[in-house]
Amino acid sequence: MRVLQISSEATPFAKTGGLADVAGALPDALERAGCDCTLVVPAYREVFEKNLPIQKTDMQFSVPVGQRNLEATIYSCSLPDQKHNVFLIGNTHCFDQDTLYGGAEDYADNAERFIFFSRAALEVAARQPHAFDIIHCHDWQTSLVPAYQKLLYQSWPTLSEARSVLTIHNMAFQGMFWHWDMLLTGFHWKYFNWRQLEFYGQLNMLKAGIVFADQLTTVSPTYAQEIQAAPGGCGLEGVLAGRASDLTGIVNGIDVETWNPRTDELIPRHYSDDDFKQGKYTARVALAARLGHAAPDDRPLVAFVGRLAEQKGVSLVLDLLHRMAGSGNARFVVLGAGDPQLQEALKVVASEHPGAIDVVIGFDEVFAHLIQAAADILLMPSQYEPCGLAQLYAFRYGTIPVVRATGGLVDTVVDVNDQTRADGTASGFVFQDFQSASLEEAVQRALAAHGNKTLWQDLVYRVMQQDWSWEVSAQQYQKVYERALANAPADVVDVR
Ligand code: ADP
């Protein structure tokens, strides 16, 4: 099966979030499963600063975007140890900037940039010697691709028979632009209607993808359900519910090489399920030293690592710190960056309890690995969580997550109770309500379990053996591709 992946970011080229991890790892996992994959990403300024083996090809063409023709310069890259082809679309005007999408404000020309990218990616595919079976795009930035394939690129033999798949990584980002940006797309105005590209008077790119793609996926089965109703669907719940039979939730895999306590270069002592106690203790000593403490104490270590955003439940974490730091039952460490007010509030509570709380503000890979290795318990009290990765990393390092029952957290963490202990599925502590008291109760349950040496050891041993590799997810994507190929393409509704 020949698969074309089109993404606005992918590791190791450019990354702002989980999308890059998926688009970076999935092609390789699909290749190992027998697919023939090609990945297309933008040639942002930063991709040339990373010492990657990028070469200019002799492909160069112009892409119509509104009244203008934008020149696409095509680069290719063969990554060591990876079989799939990568093409990068270059255009100075669109991609020679400091950041991917903008800073405090999005770039004003984001519609133009990703219309150009979506069309150029299809044009690269059209110039390949073989036809593609599947065109797989991701998030709003490439959500117009299925519409282009169906409406404007049908005459290209390498694309005409392909089926399209859209993966939604987060419904909160939809790529909404004023209606005049329709002129940039090249589509007839008749598609600007409430059943296709329009959403309350604006152009909505994600909606276009949801309507035109042959199959839809999102990053966990529970999130797939949540987005078909308010508030999870962020206004598009009706459109998604209309496509329920074509929507599949597939939990992301993790990079099991990078996040592996047996080989991790960022932790002081390697460990496995046999010797996790020694491994975690050594990490704890190293963490204490990095935080400026003479020695670690022997209270359980409760951690939070993540973006400091309301979505992540940081307000609940703050309440928890205020209520529990004085109790002497646990030690807390928080690593994160984001909302300045949340950063400040965390610093204040840490200064009030210097013997119980450490707060590190910033994005720090080394700290993240060290904390996962050193901690006993990881907090993820998210308001919503399409998939979540930190809980899967925690499992690998024998750290037990405390999570709210939402999105991917429901699909990956099984609450500890008598039955799940007996059947061996227990993997963490789950609470329902987005409330401080509920988080606190779950943390108290986790601390009580930590006090039961046999139970805890058993739990750690089991979570460390779980398989969250990309192989499992890639097989599920393959099934979606097969379904797309077996079915007729999604209808193009002709609204007049
Ligand atoms: P999201 O993609 O919504 O931010 P995920 O849980 O899917 O959340 O992935 C976030 C990943 O980024 C986690 O693995 C976490 O370790 C990492 N991370 C988040 N904040 C930081 C930080 N301040 N320093 C280092 N790593 C971080």
Image: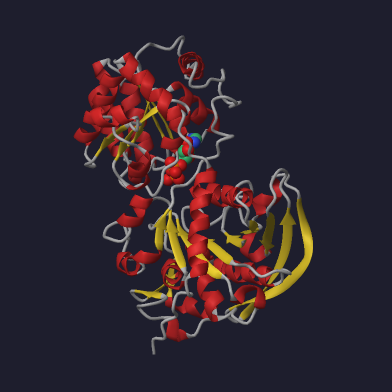
Residue 208 position within the rendered picture, expressed as x and y whole percent measured from the top left: 44, 71
Classify residue 255 by image quadrant: top right
Between 66 and 330, the residue placed more toward the observer is 330
What residue is at 41 percent from the left and 58 percent from the top? 248
Q: Is residue 452 left or right of residue 217?
A: left
Q: Residue at x 76, y 68 (%)?
A: 59
Residue 431 in percent (x, y) is at: 25, 37
Which residue is more in the foreground, 488 or 89?
488
* Above or below: residue 7 compared with residue 259: below
Quarter of the image that includes the N terminus: bottom right
Instruction: Determine the image quadrant of residue 156.
Output: bottom right
Residue pushed farthest bottom?
496
Q: How many marks?
A: 0
Residue 323 to residue 183: above or below: above
Write the residue at 47% across / 18% down: 276
Q: Is residue 459 left or right of residue 262?
A: left
Residue 316 sits in quarter? top left
Image coordinates of residue 84 in percent, x first then y, are 68, 53
Q: 173 or 484: which is nearer to us?
A: 484
- Above or below 178: residue 410: above
Q: Is residue 11 above or below residue 118?
A: above
Whether residue 24 appears in this view of the structure is yes
* Residue 138 visible in rendering: no
Q: Residue at x 36, y 56 (%)?
A: 224
Identify the residue at the far top of this view. Answer: 294
Where residue 406 appears, as percent x and y from the top left, is 31, 45
